[in-house]
Image (cartoon, rainbow, N blue to C red):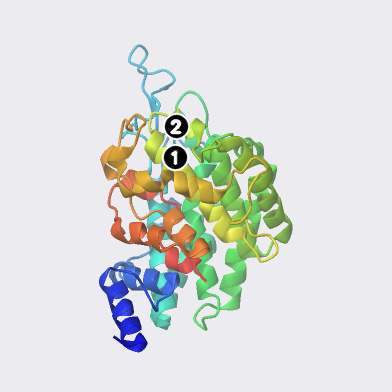
Amino acid sequence: MNLKLSILLFVALLGFCGFSTNKSIEQQAEATLKPYILKEAEWAMKQQPITVTAESSERSAGDKHDFYSEGDYWWPNPDNPAGPYIQKDGLTNPQNFVAHRLAMIRFSRIIGALASAYKITHDEKYVKQAVLHLKAWFIDKKTFMNPNLQYAQAIKGVATGRGIGIIDTIQLMEVAQGVEVLEGSSSLDQGTLMGIKSWFSEYLTWLTTHQYGKDEMNAKNNHGTCWTMQVACFAKFTGNSELMKFCADRYKDVLLPTQMAADGSFPLELKRTKPYGYSIFNLDAMSTICQILSTKNDNLWEYQTADGKSIKKGIAFLEPYLKDKNTWPYPHDVMHWESWPVAQPALIFGAAAYQDQNWLNIWKALDHDPNDEEIIRNLPVRHPLIWLN
């Protein structure tokens, strides 16, 4: 057999075995996601804006423009039903007010889907539809949301709001990233774009100066990670290089060294009643920080601490349990165990960063269209195509 024929047979065999010989990680991701994107974008084209002003709770201490939510794991006290709520960690109270959170998740899904579809097709209809929702949330005086989270994750009889509630606006990250994808479109006028960026600038100021923001920044678990992830995302969107550097330094100096163990696990998450889901969630958040902030001169994907901790080690630790969760050696989550994992952003971002086909193949095989509300809420990136270069 001559050399040319041998090479052709080898290439054919690679293709038969499922390896990509001529498509980049990004191209494979787009091919995988395209059917889901176009289907969701078709749904998004039919949706009218729903903001925080559509529903309200009599328990909120804010006004109709204020986002309000209640702590998930807080319940009426059976010994004092009319008194302050008590905590049951990991067990969600279905009677708590979540309408604003659901509206924000819906908004995030709409913008993520429309921006993804626009990136694939360059069809201006997707931008025009996105603008309707963006104006409603950030600009229209009748329906806009105030740029703060003073009343998030309140607890009846205990607190009108908490810093811990800031985690609710991870849903706005794909809105900001989606607008970045739409920026070059003629259907997104400069006045609207500047209005949106002004809103996010105001929110960044609140996140970094209000005591709730400071409390959340200093949280030692996934809450501290998610504060950094959000601030990094919104700072990049608004061009705030000072805050971007602050977040990159915080990842290197605080999050990675204090939250990760030598084996790549997250001990504080493993102690929770949902150790599997929280470990995945925190890894996704750290990976997203790396995706947002990495530059040629400061590549967080390649950074490691003096004792060898790195995001690569974190993904490698969870990889076998994402591929087959039945091998998970720790306790099962008290709720939603059956719904994890899905197509986690840590896998696709890690695959792109390290050109790792194995991680991409695991990601491809997982669920790209989850319908469990708890999973959707804890999936900070649901439209990875808009995050990939």
Residue nearest the viewer, comparing 184 with 348: 348
Q: Is residue 139 above or below residue 23?
A: above
Q: Give the camera-side residue of 134 and 113.
A: 113
Q: Are marks 1 and 2 in contact (CB under 8 Å)?
A: yes
**Badge 1 amino acid:** Ser
Badge 2 amino acid: Leu
Q: Crowding at label 1, few (<14), some or many (≥20) Cα neighbours within 10 Å?
A: many
**Residue ID for mark 2:** 270
Residue tagged by mark 1? 279
The residues bearing labels 1 and 2 have C-alpha atoms spaced at a distance of 7 Å
Question: Tag 2's secondary structure?
Answer: helix
Where is residue 237 drawn, in percent x and y?
Answer: 60, 64
Of labels 1 and 2, earlier in sequence is: 2
Name the residue rendered at 37%, 17% in the picture.
77
The residue at the point 62 percent across, 59 percent down is 293
Residue 200 in picture, x, y percent from top left = 60, 58
- Residue nearest the observer in this picture, 165 or 226: 226
Which quarter of the rendering shows the N terminus?
A: bottom left
The answer to whether one can see residue 170 in this image is yes
